[in-house]
Amino acid sequence: MELLDRYLEAVRKHLPWQRQDDIIAELRANLEAQLDEKEAALGRPLTAAEAEAWLKQLGSPILMAAPYQPQQYLIGPAIFPIYRNVMKIALTWCAIIYTVATATALLIKTPHLSDFVHAMTDVPVILLTTAAWVTLVFAALEYAVAHHRVKLPAMGAPPSAWSPGALPHLDPNGVSGGKSRTYAKAVAEVIFGYLFLIWLLLIPKYPYLLMGPGAYYLSSLPYRLAPVWIPAYWCVVALSVLQVGWNALNLYRGRWQKPQPAMHLVYKTLGMVPIILLLNAKDHAIVLLKNPALDQARLGATLDGINRSINWSVALICAIAGLQLLWGIVQLILNVYRKRAVAGR
Amino acid sequence: MTLTENLFENLRLELRRGCLTLAVLAQLRQERYGYTLRKALADDGLVIDESTLYPLLRRLEAQGLLASEWREEEKRNKRFYRLTPEGEQIFAQLLQEWHAINASIQATLNTSTNSTL
């Protein structure tokens, strides 16, 4: 039958080339036996329409051929747990190494805000590149395991010497939805937050509250803080007011039990504002000379050194705060996702 | 196909997959070629597509559970399959396992029925 021949030829194209002839010969024998039986039952050959309907019932050539192909995974179930663990470790270390390297590179020169933005926008590219390399290596490993029977060490299995006592302790903050906070802790947060705010407001008038006796020594030096400190200081004050106010409101409304990760993220975000203000100080001058006309020639180089050091420190703090914020956002998204998944069950 | 129907279909296929192997091994205690095997399974109530059965025979042969031989019958060359000694051994073990699972599920169903009465 010509239609059967055409069908088998179409199947052949999708078969593994080494076994094409053998498989087609077997399929032909089986299908011709089936055809003989059909025609014997009818007492005549199948019409073109009947033959077409029969072959259609067998399935398209590609579907008929597909199960003959060896099962192939990009990363199969045998090595997937190892892949997942390696991916986690690689991404974590990549983030750490990148942060340290970038921070060091930024510290060598006087950092600009654009350098930070650039460094932060590079993070997804670096992580994606790492993930792609890990995937590529594991895909090659999967291929070797599947095609050359490479034996893998039991990397994915947990070590047999593990101890239940060595399991990590539960998060005391109950971020995962476990324990709630105590009333005493919530009250203490409001009281100490209020005391901190008063202390903060007193610092401009009584600097020794911050620096102790060092304040008298510093006042005798020929340096003073640049004006950029004023908005940065008031940002810190505003953030403290917000924290104390929010905590007091929660206490009043009786909503102190559950931690509020979203609000913590807001604090962290707002906490970056004074840091960014300092980083954007005009000419990166965070400390100025009290009397530049007199002292510039003598102390100009020292002042540059002081400003560079402070800029480095602020840049490092900014990088750490940025990563903490990023990590907080990731955790918040994961928690929301988990809660939705639980609710959807 | 609705989500529930789709889920049922997936679970049904999963349930059938292991049983088909067992049924094929059971049929091939006696030598058969592909088409007569398919007919014998269908006669026993287990309808199986060509695109499932014939590749399954190849896989079982590659695993050493079946042996095959090309032979002429009714003026046509056909590939006949039968269990190897290893296949017979594995079949006996699988059958025992299947009986045990069947008995466990039956016992569970009986317990559930009694507790709801």
Image (spheres, rainbow, N blue to C red):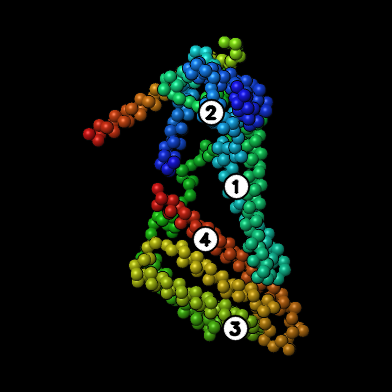
Which chain contains the residue that carries disc 4? Answer: A
Q: How crowded is the residue under tag 1: few (<14 C-alpha within 10 Å), some, or many (20+)?
A: some
| Residue at horizontal 66 percent and vertical 22 percent from the top | A21
Instruction: Tell me if label 3 and label 4 are in contact, CB under 8 Å.
Output: no
Is the residue at mark 1 from the same chain as the one at mark 3? Answer: yes
* Near-viewer residue (A244 or A331): A331
Of pointers 1 and 3, the one earlier in the residue sequence: 1
Helix, strand, or loop for circle 2?
helix
Which chain contains the residue that carries disc 3? Answer: A
Is the residue at mark 4 from the same chain as the one at mark 2? Answer: yes
Instruction: Tell me if label 1 and label 4 are in contact, CB under 8 Å.
Output: no
Residue A334: x, y in percent?
49, 55
Q: What residue type is labelled 4?
A: Gly
The residue that disc 1 covers is A87
Of pointers 2 and 3, the one earlier in the residue sequence: 2
Residue A104: x, y in percent?
69, 63
Hey, which quadrant is residue A156 in on the image?
top right
Helix, strand, or loop for circle 3?
helix
Which chain contains the residue that carries disc 1? Answer: A
The residue that disc 2 covers is A49
Helix, strand, or loop for circle 1?
helix
Q: How crowded is the residue under tag 4: few (<14 C-alpha within 10 Å), some, or many (20+)?
A: some
| Front position among marks 1 and 3 | 1
The residue that disc 3 covers is A216
The residue that disc 4 covers is A328
What whole-number distance in Å separates the C-alpha atoms at marks 4 and 2?
65 Å
| Residue at horizontal 39 percent and vertical 62 percent from the top | A258
What whole-number distance in Å separates the C-alpha atoms at marks 1 and 3?
54 Å
What whole-number distance in Å separates the C-alpha atoms at marks 2 and 3?
104 Å
